[in-house]
Amino acid sequence: MTAPAAPDHLGRPGKKLWDEVVEENEGLGPEDLALLTIACEAWDTVEKMRRRIAKDGLIITPPPHGRPQVHPAEEVRKSAQIRLQSALKQLALGVEPDAPTLPPPGRVVPASRRPGRPHVGTQRTPRRKGAT
């Protein structure tokens, strides 16, 4: 059985991740491939934003106001990192938060053998009244 090819729209980092995961895991189902696609798209975004931040710097000063601010690409990078982690967790592949590189791919637990999916999201801590 031939391994499914990476989707054409993926960039180089995403295709590399796809190839590594598919090579290590036979018989990935449609749900697994959908999650893998999400993970690969997120990895592409993480890498693209890292390159942008490395080029421009984490703190930028936009011309109209002249006030230093965190590069907008950092928020995009963080959001993509969360999507990446979520998809890899659902595929039973681990990734450390803000890891500079992905760990080697592991074996995917087939969707049919995974326990119920935990709710993935962020939990906000309510602000105390009067806190700044």
Image (spheres, grey):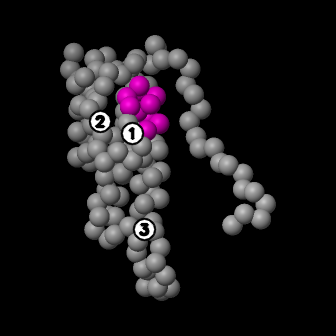
Say if mark 2 contacts mark 1, CB within 8 Å.
yes
Q: Which residue is mark 2?
A: 103
Amino acid at circle 2: Pro
Amino acid at circle 1: Glu
Q: Nearer the viewer, mark 3 or mark 1?
A: 1
Residue 78, placed above or below residue 106: below
Whole-percent x, y for residue 128 in the image: 75, 57
Amino acid at circle 3: His
Left or right, residue 87 beside residue 107: right
Front residue of 8/52: it is: 52
Is residue 5 something that shows in the picture?
no
Q: Which residue is mark 1?
A: 96
The segment highlighted magenta reads: 85-94
Place residue 26 in its image quadrant. Answer: top left
Residue at point 21%, 15% (across, down): 1
Is residue 123 something that shows in the picture?
yes
Q: Residues within 10 Å of mark 3 (few under 14, many from 20)?
A: some
Q: CA distance from mark 3 to mark 2?
A: 26 Å
